[in-house]
Image (cartoon, grey):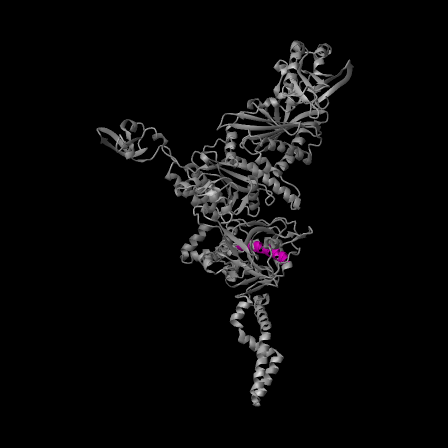
Amino acid sequence: IKRMYRTYNIIEMSTTTSGSTVLTEFKYQSADRTQGDAPCPVRYGLLAVVDELSSLDAALPELLETYQGSGPDPVNVLHLALNTGIAAGVGAEDDCIATATAMLQPHAATLKAKGVRLVSLMVPNPPKWPRMYSFTLANDYAEDPDRRNMYPTMYNLLELERLQNWSPARLPSISHNSVVLLGEQGTKPRLQQRLFARGVTHSEGMSSFAAAEATLLKSLDELQLAFLNKRVLPTASTHLFLHVLPTVDLAPAELIAAFKDIMADLISKHATRLLKLSVDEIEVRVHSKDGDVRQAVRLMASSMAGQWLKLDGYIEYLDPVTGTTTSYCSLEEDEMCFLEPYPVSSALASKRAVARRIGTTYAYDFLGLLEKSIVRAWQQSIADGAHSSMPSNLLEADELLLDGSGSLYRGSRVVGTNTVGMVGFHTTLKTPEYPDGRPLVIVANDCTVQSGSFGVLEDEFFDKVSKYARASGLPRLHIASNSGARIGLAEELKPYFKVAWNDDGNVAAGFKYLYLTEEDVGRFPDGIFHGEFIDENGKRRFRLDDIVGQQDGIGVENLRGSGLIAGETSAAYAETFTLSYVTGRSVGIGAYINRLAHRVIQMTNGPMILTGFSALNKLLGKEVYNSQDQLGGPQIMLPNGVAHQLAQDDQDGIDKVLQWLSYVPITASSQVVVGPSPDPISRSIDFMPTSSPYDPRHMLAGLTAPDGSWISGFFDQGSFTEYLAEWGKSVVVGRARLGGVPMGVIAVETRLVEQRIPADPANPASRETVLAQAGQVWYPDSAYKTAQAIADFNSAENLPLIVFANWRGFSGGTRDMFGEILKFGSYIVDNLRTYRHPVFAYIPPCGELRGGAWVVIDPTINEDMMEMYADVNARGGILEPPGICDVKFRKPDLLKTMHRLDEKLQQLKAELATVEESLGSEDEATALRTQISQRESQLLPLYMQISYEFADLHDRPGRMLAKGVIRDAVPWPKAREYFAWRVRRRLAQDALVKQMKAADESLSHADCVSMLSGWMGGDSWEDDNAVLDWFNTDAANIDGLISDVRTAAVTKTVIELVADLSVEAKAQLIADLS
């Protein structure tokens, strides 16, 4: 009794025995606040335990006679329990229910008079859970199948009456404290399904994260089991409900705040599974206790208003008689109260079902995913020690809407009411990098409007949103799920056009033209079609020459719109940060604008294609392709470099979007932000590159040793993210942080890699080709990858770049020369020449930079921005020692060196000279020559190595420094600290140079640096720490000096402008100015 009525106050309880029947009487009362704080009636209950069902018939009159409850309000209960189970067999349960109903029916009037609203029957069913049946007043004391095998109070605790609009059917569940129901509305193909997993918990401590997580996972397990049922469609929406029976000692406002914190963390942590199981709502009913006041509280994470799993909390009010919730109300000043059965399927639910059917997420729900990703980013940042707490209001979003004049404005509307298949948002994200908020403009295809196709209105909206982002340099995210340019026909003409046959009696002879009757022509206004009236066989008809149609957006105008957004996206890439997340199929122009944005994250089921596979099969005349993935799935788009990253699902995709944004400045004109770094700048680098092949990612990011210890790399621990990993594998590119500074990075793969070129399914003779690529060599794909990465880092990401230069050169074989290695290598120079941010080229330990590879990254390409460095054990030169020795230290030179250095050869040579001078025997001279030749052959391998060492001495950092081709030789263990301070100094210095050049446009970068050096004075200009300290401590003075530069520049300009004016004109100008 206490367990079943845990949410009530048990006022009194007593147990007696009457013969073989055990009677437990109890009085109880609702404990939670009621509507208007009306008093709750004291209820009466009786539990009678009898031996078996057959004895119940005789015992029932006596039980009712002694039953203390009274009406007229139906507030009392009668529980009957048997000591003996029922017979086995298929019909045994039905017989039991029929027998119990027959026993109760004659006493219905008595039960009603005593205010009994429910009679329950509990039947043992060992070893399983007891069978339970409920006979309700509403059912005239007949058994209610919806309550079968539930605790008598379970139906109300789970609020199952709210499911009435969905006609739910029970599905198997794992726990006896849970119920899983499948509700349906409509008919196929528009059938809407909703899965309800509802449960109660008796567990204490539900205000803790661990307990809440365990309960959520149990609920998700219930849903996972339900989705295995064949009746459940993959598009079904799911709702979770949990009733926490123990009270929580917190005031309602505190409880709601705690719930929001816990639930935000839970949703963020388990977002992938929640998405996979299509969870659209989570309800938790909790009983708050603040002193002596007990209040039911409703905690919600709901997508019903549009945003995915938006968190809210409400206080509840009960009906004092029925004990059920009548309404729940917000705690805000403008109190809103509501409670109704779960509504019939809405347009919003239908749109979500459409999106899920094609394997993506509804466009508006991405805002919820974004918020969950921000929460996760903060949790990681706090765990890393970079921050101590998380701010509130992590995501603010305004929808971008068009006013009557076609201009964009920030506002809101009811989610799902858009009629254009494109939506936009201006969001503000409070991320660990920008705790005060950073803007992000989102434009997303709505795949539920004409399959997300691009019509004229969609193109115009996309163009306006992109220009809105570009005008302020705001990052622009395109969430892509579309079917390309919209196609259509003039549907209004279909019922009316006629065919002029060559032979009316034989349609197989073909037709001459299409036409309209004179009557049908009059149905349409001018301009819908063009042609001319003709007379044929005495009949006047209008021969159609072309059709324009009443509706805009059915043909070439859509292609014009596609051209508009293609050009706009290209311009946006040049002027602001652009990123495309491909969440669903992206066709034609949809695929092109992804590529034109350059940065692409592709979801596993988001193919980018130009033409659908079925259309290609028709073109080929045979079934060649069987899926879109064969044409543009990740297995195509990742190895060819169109897609940078692969996302497993939409939450993972948005996580990757946010991660990419973490490296990007707040606007396109801003410098990268220097964030806190929990990884000490001054630490040394543990990983040591070797002369044998190694994974360069370990050099960049570090690794965990077999014993579990951490071997640190160059960048901040955990900050390196690789991009374009499947393309051009002989080069590694990514983004990372160095002492909290975001940087672009390019490194070299030293191991052998493979390039795979897939077979063409349209050509039966085609086979997959696997090409081996040696380490430390640029190939066409990796050279293009390098150039592309440099362009991306430079374009609005504004990233300082470090290149770990370890190339022996470019691959110059026939295949690679044909594969345009020369062109792609030159792109590297093109993109470095226009790079606007610091670039550091560093030759790592055991690394070498040779020939053309040195040329394309030499600092003279962009002296204002580029600097070259080398480790003390690095090498640089035109050719490797064996190669240069083949040209400049050949065998004659080796022999000369031997004879100059080897004493034995010198002795033999002297003896030979003596013999030859003294006219000794020719045999003796021949023997000496043979000994000399043998000695030379013996020494040749050794002296070849000596020549290599001699050549190698020319390639060392000492000579590089002497020749001024590198700025410094930096030992690898201290390279992290050196470059961390160097990049900070360069960023601060370049920011001042930018101000100076803005003050005086005639100044060059070198002029500005020279002026800064002069302003600082002393001999510390080469000390990065000292310069940074000066920038910080003397900022006001530097600002004043820059102001002086501006004044001088303005003065110079004015003098030049008035130089040719007469004395009178100058005097008048001065008078006007004063």
Q: Residue at x 37, y 34 (%)?
A: 489
Which portion, as a residue range, is magenta? 974-993
Give percent across and percent down for residue 534.
23, 32
Locate residue 184: give its quadrant.
top right
Q: Is residue 140 left or right of residue 554?
A: right
The answer to if 449 sits in the magenta stretch is no
| Residue 712 visible, this orientation | yes
Give percent across and percent down for residue 765.
44, 49
| Residue 304 visible, this orientation | no
Q: Residue at x 64, y 56 (%)?
A: 687
In depth, the one of 809 and 1044 nearer the eye is: 809
Q: Is residue 122 above or below residue 498?
A: above
Q: Is residue 865 above or below residue 24?
A: below
Q: Residue at x 59, y 67 (%)?
A: 958
Locate residue 885: give its quadrant.
bottom right
| Total numbered labels placed on residues in the image | 0
In depth, the one of 701 and 566 nearer the eye is: 701
The answer to if 979 sits in the magenta stretch is yes
Q: Is residue 932 above or below residue 708?
A: below
Give percent across and percent down for residue 132.
67, 21
In depth, the one of 338 and 810 nearer the eye is: 810
